[in-house]
Image (tube, rainbow, N blue to C red):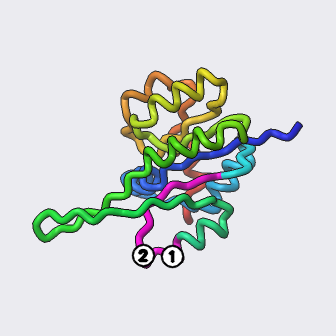
Amino acid sequence: MEINNYAFIDGNNLNWGIKSMGWKLDYKKFRIYLRDKYKVTKAFIFIGYKPGNERLYESLQEDNYICIFKPIMEIKTGKKIKIKGNVDALMVLHIMIELPNYDKAVIVSGDGDFYSIIEYLIQKNKLLKIVVPNEKYSTLLKKFSMFILPINLIKGKVELK
């Protein structure tokens, strides 16, 4: 029987985590890595939708990601505009909706908000890996250290050259 694992990617956490470490991710290489290393047949990326970023979204889809969009909010503080596109609840919802369809899940996020769903996936023997995209990920996730892969360890395989 063919292995059928899914990846659930917190796009904002991945983007900002990699940026904070001073390098760029090659999304195509990362998708290939997930396929080859973890037998990921579907990779869902959860991302805030911002008009004007259509080329990015098309590129992700060409690289075999399934984009799940959430409308962004623009929060004005003084003269600065902060863009907020929190995808946590949307990602948890899809992890649960897709539960019967995959063997194991790869979670890509270092956000402690995923603590409960990770715990649930472990109870159901459905968690394969947690790829954390930043050096300083939530201390809540330390409990799951046996599942954690810091993305820096695979930088050579997934970095945009």
What x and y, as percent, mark residue 5?
71, 41
Report the amino acid beneath label 1.
Answer: Glu
Alpha-carbon neighbours of circle 1 within 10 Å: few (<14), some, or many (≥20)? few
**Marks 1 and 2, how far apart in space?**
7 Å
Q: Please tell me whether residue 47 is drawn above or below residue 130 in the rendered image.
A: below
Report the amino acid beneath label 2.
Answer: Pro
Rendering quarter of residue 84: bottom left
- Mark 1, secondary structure of its residue: helix
- Residue holding disc 1: 54
Q: Is residue 146 magenta?
A: no
- Residue holding disc 2: 51
Q: Residue visible at 47% across and 46% down?
A: 133
Query: In which quadrant of the rendered image does the C terminus lie?
Result: bottom right
Task: Report whether 42 appears left or right of 93.
Answer: right
Q: Residue visible at 42% across and 75% down?
A: 51
Query: In which quadrant of the rendered image does the N terminus lie?
Result: top right
- Tell me if label 1 and label 2 are in contact, CB under 8 Å: yes
What x and y, as percent, mark residue 59?
59, 71
Tell me the tag on residue 93: none
Along the line of sight, which residue is nearer the eye, 153 or 47?
47
Q: Residue visible at 59% across and 73% down?
A: 58
Alpha-carbon neighbours of circle 2 within 10 Å: few (<14), some, or many (≥20)? few
Q: Please tell me whether residue 114 is drawn above or below residue 158 in the rendered image.
A: above
- Magenta stretch in the rendered image: 43-56
Rendering quarter of residue 28: bottom right
Q: Is residue 55 magenta?
A: yes
Can you name the residue that lies furthest to the right here?
Answer: 1
